[in-house]
Amino acid sequence: MLTPVLDDRTLLDSVKVYLECNLNTSLAAKKLYMHRNTLQYRVDKFIEKTSIDIKRFPNAVAVYFMFSVLETSRKED
């Protein structure tokens, strides 16, 4: 499901911070030192490429778990 965005580390990192900030765009943008519109663009880009609407909580949780699995598998390699 994440295959279209796996090569875009910046996008993945931005989305992960967004999820860790409980889908709060303003807070996540502050943590990433970027304008909230930039972060919103990246979130929309993620949704467009993966067809997973992470603005909905159940989808956000699923993606966060996918990120955890990805990080675990990268550490093992």
Image (cartoon, helix red, strand yellow):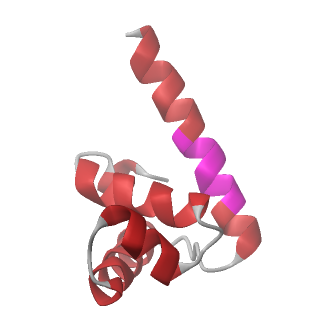
Q: Is residue 2 placed above or below 60 in the rendered structure?
A: above
* Residue 75 position by quadrant: top left
Q: Say how many tags the image has.
A: 0
Secondary structure mostly seen in the magenta stretch: helix
Q: Residue pushed farthest bottom?
A: 37
* Residue 55 position by quadrant: bottom right
Q: Nearer the viewer, residue 60 or 13?
A: 13
At 31% from the left edge and 89% from the top edge, which residue is drawn?
A: 37
At 57% from the left edge and 78% from the top edge, which residue is drawn?
A: 24
Q: Residue pushed farthest right?
A: 58
19 displayed left or right of 2: right
- Per the image, is 62 magenta? yes
At 49% from the left edge and 80% from the top edge, which residue is drawn?
A: 25
Magenta segment range? 61-67
Image coordinates of residue 40 in percent, x first then y, are 38, 84
Quarter that holds the C terminus: top left
Q: Nearer the viewer, residue 17 or 70?
A: 17
Image coordinates of residue 59 in percent, x first then y, are 68, 67
At 23% from the left edge and 46% from the top edge, which residue is drawn?
A: 7
Image coordinates of residue 35 in percent, x first then y, are 28, 83
- Per the image, is 55 magenta? no
Q: Nearer the viewer, residue 71 or 38?
A: 38
Q: Residue pushed farthest top?
A: 76
Image coordinates of residue 27 in percent, x first then y, are 50, 75
45 displayed left or right of 28: left
Q: Nearer the viewer, residue 38 or 2?
A: 38
51 displayed left or right of 30: right
Q: Is residue 29 placed above or below 76 in the rendered structure?
A: below
